[in-house]
């Protein structure tokens, strides 16, 4: 089932100033890693595009668009992106701010009437940087009507916040729902039309859309989930218009490359200024520190530095699909991957392409030895922490500490100055104290959980 299909391969000689810092990509390497990861992750198919400078130098489709039809997957097929949608929502909001139509640091109630007063005090800056204090959720199924976005937000009460605004970074899909609704309200037209007119049209992304009924008129990779150990098409297709601004754009690897090229070239594409240069700078600047100290969040992007490279990137996951957009703007390099299984961002493929093209420094293989927590650490950590309806419970367990995340138990150890959750490939767990030194938040997997007892 996992075979090379629908190939579009273009190679070009790199001529920009950073040429000495990159190497030509071997398509055989990409094919081998892609097929191995598709097989291992039970993902039917994926499409890849690689950008250098201001051009796509490699694009390819691997595997199947649908396990039912066996149709081959091509790099111009549409996929639903998941959270990489956030960079487009952020682009629209920042663009409106640059035009003087909204203030990123003003309460959204200045532009949106009828909100709960607590919700109305949030700012676009807090929403776009995930510092709003809004809890996280991502229901996949719901209304298909444009009005669902505003209707849902107007029903929010103060308890939609789990933490004081501005207190801590915590990934929140609802924050981007409200950011998208802000763009909708200020523009006077539905969110889907705002993105189409402000982003897709200037960039020449002719097939990209937020609307499922439009996406299905183009070649479309079907979304899959694992069922009885095998990938199966999700029927009916998941859709929830109340959450479109956080994760529901349909696009292809090739059309996404147009946004990436503009982003890495100060807003220029095909010899034209299609995005404001200042917009790029604002979105790729750090606006929030991600707990743990080695990453920041811009607007719609995670920002980090590793292996001698500054990265600007985001992943996406939603029912049936996954995506990765990874840029190294200083090197004018990007890799774009879209896949058609829930949560499949193909990280091994993204790493292999990045390492091959950029000749990255070797990864550090040395990890501090894990050891149990001290009695004092056990005492400080123990408790229940919440984010919306999700809960993390930390409790002593025979001289150790265990965590229950929504009922699933994991072991906690310390490695150097880090706390690790789980075995195998553990997640980093960060303990965030209040001004008195008592642990106020537990941060894991991008979300903060606030102490409840």
Image (cartoon, grey):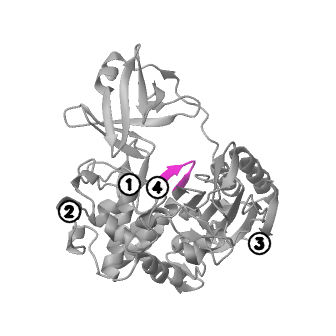
> Alpha-carbon distance for marks 2 and 3?
53 Å
| Label drawn at residue 10 | 3
Q: Is residue 357 above or below residue 384?
A: below
Residue contact at pointers 1 and 4, CB within 8 angstroms: no
Write down the quadrant of residue 185 in the picture: bottom left
* Residue neighbourhood size for the residue with mark 3, other residues' Cα within 10 Å, grouped as few (<14), some (14–19), many (≥20): few
Residue contact at pointers 3 and 4, CB within 8 angstroms: no
Q: Earlier in the sequence, mark 3 or mark 4?
A: 3
Local SS, label 4: strand
Residue contact at pointers 1 and 2, CB within 8 angstroms: no
Label tally: 4
- Residue corresponding to mark 1: 172
Q: Earlier in the sequence, mark 2 or mark 3?
A: 3
Q: Earlier in the sequence, mark 1 or mark 4?
A: 1
Task: Report whether residue 71 is seen.
Answer: yes
> Alpha-carbon distance for marks 3 and 4?
29 Å
Of badges 4 and 2, nearer the viewer stands 2
Q: Earlier in the sequence, mark 3 or mark 1?
A: 3
- Residue corresponding to mark 2: 116
Stretch of the chain drawn in magenta: 304-311
Q: Is residue 382 above or below residue 325?
A: above
Of badges 2 and 3, nearer the viewer stands 2
- Considering depth in this image, is 262 or 16 the residue closer to the camera? 262
Picture residue at 22% right of the left edge, 54% below the top: 158
Of badges 1 and 4, nearer the viewer stands 1
Q: Earlier in the sequence, mark 1 or mark 2?
A: 2
Residue contact at pointers 2 and 3, CB within 8 angstroms: no
| Residue 213 image point, x, y percent | 56, 76
Local SS, label 1: loop
Q: Is residue 302 above or below residue 398?
A: below
- Residue corresponding to mark 4: 303
């Amino acid at each position: 089932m996992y075979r090379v299909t629908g190939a579009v391969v273009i190679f070009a000689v790199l001529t920009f100033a950073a040429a000495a810092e990159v190497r030509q990509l071997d398509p055989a390497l990409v094919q081998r890693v892609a097929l191995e990861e598709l097989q291992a992750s039970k993902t039917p198919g994926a499409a890849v595009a690689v950008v250098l400078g201001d051009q796509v130098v490699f694009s390819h489709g691997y595997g199947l668009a649908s396990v039912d039809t066996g149709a081959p997957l091509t790099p111009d097929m549409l996929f639903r992106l998941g959270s990489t949608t956030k960079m487009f929502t952020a682009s629209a909001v920042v663009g409106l701010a640059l035009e003087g139509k909204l203030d990123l640091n003003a309460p959204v109630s200045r532009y949106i009437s009828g909100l709960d007063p607590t919700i109305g005090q949030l700012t676009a800056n807090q929403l776009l940087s995930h510092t709003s204090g809004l809890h996280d959720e991502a229901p996949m199924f719901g209304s298909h009507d444009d009005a669902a976005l505003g209707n849902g937000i107007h029903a929010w009460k103060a308890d939609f916040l789990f933490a004081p605004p501005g207190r801590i970074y915590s990934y929140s899909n609802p924050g981007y729902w409200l950011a998208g609704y802000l763009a909708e309200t200020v523009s006077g037209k539905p969110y889907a039309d705002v993105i189409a007119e402000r982003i897709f049209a200037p960039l020449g992304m002719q097939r990209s859309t937020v609307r499922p009924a439009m996406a299905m008129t183009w070649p479309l990779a079907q979304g899959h989930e694992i069922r009885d150990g095998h990938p199966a098409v999700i029927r009916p297709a998941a859709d929830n218009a109340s959450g479109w601004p956080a994760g529901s754009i349909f696009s292809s690897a090739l059309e996404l490359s147009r946004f990436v090229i503009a982003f890495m070239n100060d807003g220029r594409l095909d010899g034209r200024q299609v995005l404001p240069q200042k917009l790029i700078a604002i979105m790729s600047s750090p606006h929030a520190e991600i707990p743990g100290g080695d990453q920041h969040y811009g607007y719609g992007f995670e920002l980090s530095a590793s292996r001698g490279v500054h990265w600007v990137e985001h992943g996406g996951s939603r029912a049936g699909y996954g995506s990765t957009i990874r840029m190294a703007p200083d090197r004018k390099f990007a890799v774009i991957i879209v896949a058609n299984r829930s949560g499949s961002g193909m990280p091994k493929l993204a790493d292999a392409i990045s390492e091959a093209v950029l000749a990255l420094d070797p990864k550090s293989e040395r990890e501090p030895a894990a050891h149990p927590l001290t009695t004092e650490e056990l005492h400080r950590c123990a408790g229940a922490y919440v984010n919306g309806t999700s809960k993390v419970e930390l409790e002593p367990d025979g001289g150790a500490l265990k965590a229950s995340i929504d009922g699933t138990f994991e072991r906690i150890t310390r490695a150097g100055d880090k706390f690790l959750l789980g075995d195998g490939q553990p997640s980093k767990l960060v303990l965030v104290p209040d001004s008195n030194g008592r642990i106020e938040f537990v941060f894991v997997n991008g979300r903060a959980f606030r102490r409840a007892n």
